[in-house]
Image: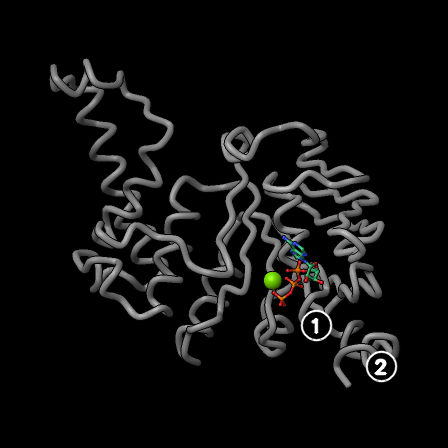
């Protein structure tokens, strides 16, 4: 589903990514770990199209994404969440998710709205059902009418996840999804991610979460991939232990 091929990004003298290559098979959950400044967020920026690599390319389902805008990547089924949460504070939790569904329109647009066409009403019903489904999945049903701005950061993170899941992405990027979550919410998040059909690439510092949630792990250090493998392989890898796990 995702192939990163020889990607390099430099900021002045800093090589944030240096010839990074790896693949993620369809439906798998892949974790990216590494110390602060390893290049994890930069990698996400490249995959989601916010930053163009100096070298290398990214493919999604075989398609070269070089030169494809973030919006068109999103249309192709790619979603991401951010290290700092981004939700609509002045909308309710339910409306945040609804807005994530509404962005590509459909159902005949404004004219259909005004005429109250049956096709439009059916679409609205389907959307409300999908919102309810996603809120339930993320444990947000009791908070559906709360304003997002009033929520603690852990809950806002779940709202952001719900928004990203709303229209069933093919490839989901999660940047530090457990930060701000308590132990119970972290476990729940792991279960939600495991239950998805979606291919997931996630950056995370919580090793217990990474080991328990991911099928594969890519270890970055100073912009280079120093190891890839299953959680068990990564735990035993001498290079990783020396460089990172200590
Ligand atoms: N916009 C930028 N301008 C200059 N240097 C940058 C920029 N973004 C990142 N860097 C540098 O590139 C390197 C990789 O940064 P990046 O944010 O990708 O790391 P990270 O693995 O996400 O770190 P963290 O775990 O702290 O989130 C770091 O040395 C960082 O200082
Ligand atoms: Mg980062």
Q: Residue at the location (81% across, 81% down)? A: 241
- The label on residue 44 is none
Q: Residue at the location (45% across, 42% down)? A: 168
Q: Residue at the location (49% across, 69% down)? A: 178
Instruction: Name the quadrant where ligand 2 sits.
Output: bottom right
Name the side, left or right, on which 121 lies relative to 244: left
Q: How many marks?
A: 2
Q: Is 141 drawn above or below residue 26 in the view shown?
A: below
Name the side, left or right, on which 150 lies relative to 174: left
Residue that numbered label 1 is attached to: 35
Residue that numbered label 2 is attached to: 242
**Is 10 or 29 nearer to us in this picture?**
10
Q: Is 11 drawn above or below residue 101 in the view shown?
A: below
Q: Is mark 2 within 8 Å of ligand 1?
A: no
**Is 51 or 156 nearer to us in this picture?**
51
Which image quarter is the N terminus in? top right
Q: In x, y percent, where is residue 4?
A: 75, 44
Q: Secondary structure at mark 1?
A: loop
Q: Residue at the location (75% across, 56% down)? A: 16
Q: In x, y percent, where is residue 246?
A: 77, 86
Q: In x, y percent, where is residue 92?
A: 21, 53
- Report the mark closest to the observer, 1 or 2: 1
Q: Is mark 1 within 8 Å of ligand 1?
A: yes
Q: Give the quarter of the image for residue 50.
A: top right
Judged from this view, the residue extending furthest toward the right is 238
What crowding class fits label 2: few (fewer than 14 Cα within 10 Å), some (14-19), or many (20 or more)?
few
């Amino acid at each position: 589903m995702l192939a990163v091929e020889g990607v390099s990004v430099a900021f002045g003298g800093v090589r944030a990514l240096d010839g990074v290559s790896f693949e993620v098979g369809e439906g798998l959950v892949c974790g990216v770990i590494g110390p602060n400044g390893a290049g994890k967020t930069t990698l996400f920026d490249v995959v989601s199209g916010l930053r163009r690599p100096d070298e290398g390319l990214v493919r999604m389902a075989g398609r070269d994404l070089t030169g494809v805008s973030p919006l068109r990547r999103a249309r192709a089924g790619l979603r991401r969440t951010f290290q700092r949460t981004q939700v609509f504070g002045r909308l309710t939790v339910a409306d945040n998710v609804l807005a994530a569904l509404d962005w590509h329109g459909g159902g005949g647009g404004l004219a259909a709205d005004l005429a109250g066409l049956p096709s439009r009403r059916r679409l609205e019903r389907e959307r409300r059902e999908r919102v309810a489904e996603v809120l339930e999945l993320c444990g947000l049903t009791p908070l559906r009418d709360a304003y997002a701005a009033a929520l603690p950061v852990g809950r806002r993170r779940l709202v952001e996840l719900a928004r990203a899941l709303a229209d069933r992405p093919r490839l989901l990027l999660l940047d530090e999804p457990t930060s701000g979550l308590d132990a119970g919410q972290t476990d729940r998040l792991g279960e939600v991610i495991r239950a998805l059909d979606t291919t997931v690439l996630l950056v995370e510092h919580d090793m217990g979460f990474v080991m328990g949630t991911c099928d594969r792990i890519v270890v970055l250090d100073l912009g280079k991939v120093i190891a890839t493998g299953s959680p068990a392989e990564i735990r035993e890898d001498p290079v990783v232990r020396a460089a990172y796990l200590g």
